Amino acid sequence: MGKRIGFQTVELSSKPKILQSYTIVGPKEGEGPLREYFHEILSDDMCDCKSFELAESKIHYKAVTSCIKSAGKKEADINYIFAGDLLNQIMASTFMARDLEIPFIGLYGACSTFTEAMTMAAMAIEAEFASYTIASTSSHFSSAERQFRLPLEMGSQRAPSSQWTVTGAAALLIGREGNYPYITHVTTGKVKDYGVKDPNEMGAAMAPAAVDTLKQHFQDTNRTEKDYDLIVSGDLGKVGKAITIELLKEYGYNIESNYIDCGDEIFHGESQGTNCGGSGAACSAAVMSSMIYKGLLSKKYKRVLLISTGALLSSTSSLQGQSIPGIAHAVAVECGGD
Amino acid sequence: MGKRIGFQTVELSSKPKILQSYTIVGPKEGEGPLREYFHEILSDDMCDCKSFELAESKIHYKAVTSCIKSAGKKEADINYIFAGDLLNQIMASTFMARDLEIPFIGLYGACSTFTEAMTMAAMAIEAEFASYTIASTSSHFSSAERQFRLPLEMGSQRAPSSQWTVTGAAALLIGREGNYPYITHVTTGKVKDYGVKDPNEMGAAMAPAAVDTLKQHFQDTNRTEKDYDLIVSGDLGKVGKAITIELLKEYGYNIESNYIDCGDEIFHGESQGTNCGGSGAACSAAVMSSMIYKGLLSKKYKRVLLISTGALLSSTSSLQGQSIPGIAHAVAVECGGD
């Protein structure tokens, strides 16, 4: 039975297993450095749909159902799906779920939603409220641009510090049996706001939240950065990553040698024109569910700390001159088996 | 330790207690039939803020902090806050949480968010992941109207079947000690879509989800409508309430004599011009946290089933001609003590 250790962390003693992952990404992501790890690369990010939003929902549905099928399970085996996305009223997730017969818990944590979903999905397994759960998220470059910034048709110039919303969806199927990678700890973040107001500076807005949760995770677990093969942040991008490294040094943690950022990994920044890197609810989801999960399966990684980060802005809050609160949730995963 | 009974229900054997509730509503709600039950009635629904959205966030913050204080607890005693609202990117909840030092789980389930939050908050207590949790939601008539329908300044005429979004916020503090009302079962809903496309027909869009979850709750628990003093739906309004009663008869359940709808209860429909009744994430939250909770405390009600219902539309999905998926989550609460 799981127990709370420290202020923000729960230790999951039953070690909920990640039995299966599934990742679908868009054509641009499929040309990036992680190409070989994705389960499916779309040739057309519209997926025969009439809108970007419906395309995102279709991709999300496909990731979830393919994950269930790949694990040899059926929809009826899944007790809960914990899902979210960036769209207003999480339209991609709710429209995905209307075609499933699975109890649905809708989440919103911006780009931190994936570890939020992993946390809830793992807790439900740990507490034996469920036999199998799904954690899933999606995002789509085109639906996000027109919702948060400007319609693509306007051809606006992108700021140097801007990030590129990942088109894709990913799902993990969590249960309790087998020699699979397992979740040992979840550290749930607080909302932190340090006054950054520029929606093109999301890395800077999210970095203090990442630092706060990482520091708290280390304190709660009596671990340090050295206990992890890899510390993986969600989508801080180049700017946010650099800030996080520097701020953590002030607390005595030096993560430079074993730290990557999903936003920084998913694109060839220079040649793909993605500026500071990828972002979006699918960013850390796609990297975790492909490269990281496969690395845990192959025991290339023994112990990974994934910390997805969210910039909690809306176009309403930005237009009203509000700053951007950030949040970050951490999940510690170990490779299973012998 | 909680256990899953049936497909969608978990029985919470530790009986997580609702130690405290707190409800704040706007002036119009304060003139309604439930006036005497609310903890606080605003004289001005702008709360000295510059926008409706910031006012909603401020009300939400006040409900949460007042709930904690009224229970004689401190912020640091609360391990998780599960919160959501109707705004894009749940702005009211995230901006509320930036002023709190409490780990935050953002939820979105439209007007079903309150029972979604109660479910997660009770499960965290049941599993001993937390000592105390908060479940809270908010909504605001003016922020909802301009986001989902039209700006108030346009003075649009309201459809006869339309509902009036409740201005308010409510919070419950859940823990494990004392002789308080306690949560015995949670039944998590699936997303159901029966093709209703008119955003003024939310009651009709949500009724099939309510029926599905109620039927499943009765089957999973081996209970019937007769096992409850009161069955309380979220905000189906007059139209959705009538549909729900009729549809449930087809499954052999007659809830006519012990069934109320929060949307139907909160306003004097005729004299207050609220047409089909109240709605919004604060609707079932405000009724549960005031009249129902106080009725459980005084043992007027022995066993209540609250089923908040959500219409999962966004202005994007409506403009794209999509139908409105619905969802409903049920929570069974009993009066505690001797």
Image (tube, coloured by chain):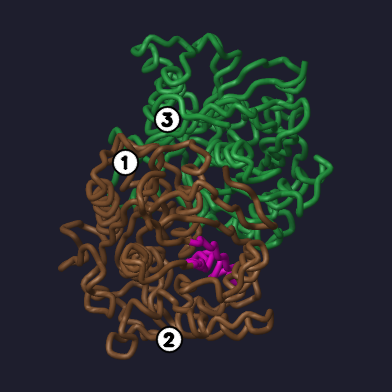
Chain colours: A brown, B green
- Residue at the image point whose x is 67% and y is 81% from the top: A252
C-alpha distance separating marks 3 and 1: 16 Å
Q: Which chain carries label 3?
A: B
Q: Nearer the viewer, mark 3 or mark 1?
A: 3
Q: Residue A98 carries which label?
A: 1
| A311 in magenta | yes
The answer to which of marks 2 and 1 sits earlier in the sequence is 1
Give the residue type that dot 1 points to: Arg
Q: For the residue labelled by badge 2, is the local secondary structure a helix, a strand or a loop?
A: loop
Q: Quadrant of the C terminus of chain B?
A: top right
Give the residue type that dot 3 points to: Gln
- Residue at the image point whose x is 28% and y is 85% from the top: A272
In front here: B158 or A188? A188
Q: Which of marks 2 and 1 is in front?
A: 1
Give the residue type that dot 2 points to: Ala
**Which residue does the numbered mark 3 point to in the structure image?**
B8
Q: Which chain carries label 2?
A: A
Side of B283 where B238 appears, left or right: left
C-alpha distance separating marks 2 and 3: 47 Å
Q: Which of marks 2 and 3 is in front?
A: 3
**Which residue does the numbered mark 2 point to in the structure image?**
A159
Query: In x, y percent, where is residue B128?
Result: 64, 41
Residue extent of the magenta highlight: A305-332
| B285 in magenta | no
Do we see residue A299 in this rendering? yes
User: Are the residues tagged 2 and 3 within 8 Å (C-beta)?
Assistant: no
Is B11 situated above or below A186? above
C-alpha distance separating marks 2 and 1: 37 Å
* Residues packed near mark 3 inside 10 Å, few (<14), some (14 to 19) or many (20 plus): many
Q: For the residue labelled by badge 1, is the local secondary structure a helix, a strand or a loop?
A: loop
